Amino acid sequence: MSDVYETILLPTDGSEGTAAAAEHAGTIAAQFDATVHVVSVADERNRFESPSAGLAGEAWDERERERAEATTRETAAALPDEVSVETAVVDGIPHEAIVEYAESAGVDVVVMGTHGRTGLDHYLVGSVAEKVVRTSPVPVLTVGLDD
Amino acid sequence: MSDVYETILLPTDGSEGTAAAAEHAGTIAAQFDATVHVVSVADERNRFESPSAGLAGEAWDERERERAEATTRETAAALPDEVSVETAVVDGIPHEAIVEYAESAGVDVVVMGTHGRTGLDHYLVGSVAEKVVRTSPVPVLTVGLDD
């Protein structure tokens, strides 16, 4: 391990859970003078899960990517001003794309909420967070809604 | 949430996973000038799981408690010298006792290894860590062996 946290990955889906995680990522980043990578995933499964409302696949991808980009900007804006921020949108299946990003960017820690956009998360740890905890090559700080 | 981490809970079972977690707890504690509570659980289930080797229940409890105390001292000694440390042994079922301690002591974050003393943990997140992540009232930093 490194002696300090220089790079923090903050996956975002724009949920309340992300907002809680962002507070912790901001606190740690400010303390360690670290850079926060705010990353959202353009979920390639969404086009198949959505009602086929006449949208061509390409248009659907574009819309999903725009959503992801907007989410990334919003979360980045919520971090303290003094914190260095990088943003990215990656395509894939959320937990896989998050772990791949953590590996390729060499982040020191992942900070993520346990209450994501999907349902059921009020009594279970978020399914994305759980999968990231299981497979992450680096430590993961999971943050609930009340933390 | 608080703006800083003042109190960190480091549950210990003396495993390699604890050693990896202790490094991160020490790093965070040093940075935030926080106190680390090193807590080990005298597992009240162990007496029932052990082969009944003629040990009376009371003697078994005492032995389990001594193991827990020794583990706590060893983990505390592995933390950086400049870090404030408190130690405790609590009785109970590990994940429940850890969450109860986090609540009653008002810790700001739990730092724990995903590779505990029980088997199977080399490919799954540790079962104790997973249950703590699911039920903890405060953020949990999970640390694997290679982190």
Image: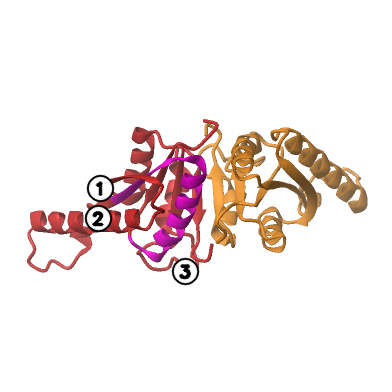
Chain colours: A red, B orange
Q: Of the residues shown, which amino acid type is indicated by label 3?
A: His
* Residues at marks 3 and 2 on the same chain: yes
Q: Mark 1 lies on which chain?
A: A
The Cα–Cα distance between marks 1 and 2, rounded to whole angstroms, is: 6 Å
Is residue B132 rendered to the left or right of residue A144?
A: right
> Label 3: how many residues lie within 10 Å, few (<14), some (14-19) or many (20+)?
few
Q: Residue at x 24, y 58 (%)?
A: A70
**Tags 1 and 2 in contact by the CB under 8 Å rule?**
yes
Residue matched to label 1: A89
Question: Is B91 above or below relative to A120?
Answer: above
Dividing the picture into quarters, in which one does residue A34 lie? top left
Mark nearest the camera among 3 and 2 is 2
Query: Which numbered marker is on residue A78?
Result: none
Q: Of the residues shown, which amino acid type is indicated by label 2?
A: Ala
Residue matched to label 3: A122
What secondary structure is found at the residue carrying circle 2? helix
Dividing the picture into quarters, in which one does residue A17 lie? bottom left
Is residue A72 rendered to the left or right of residue B100?
A: left
Q: Position of residue B46 (x, y in %)?
A: 77, 49
**Extent of the magenta region:** A14-40
Query: Which numbered marker is on residue A68?
Result: 2
Q: Of the residues shown, which amino acid type is indicated by label 1?
A: Val
Q: Which residue is drawn at 77% across and 39% down?
A: B71
Instruction: Answer whether residue A18 is magenta in the image.
Output: yes
Q: Which chain carries label 2?
A: A
Is residue A69 rendered to the left or right of residue A84?
A: left
**Mark earlier in primary sequence (1, 3):** 1
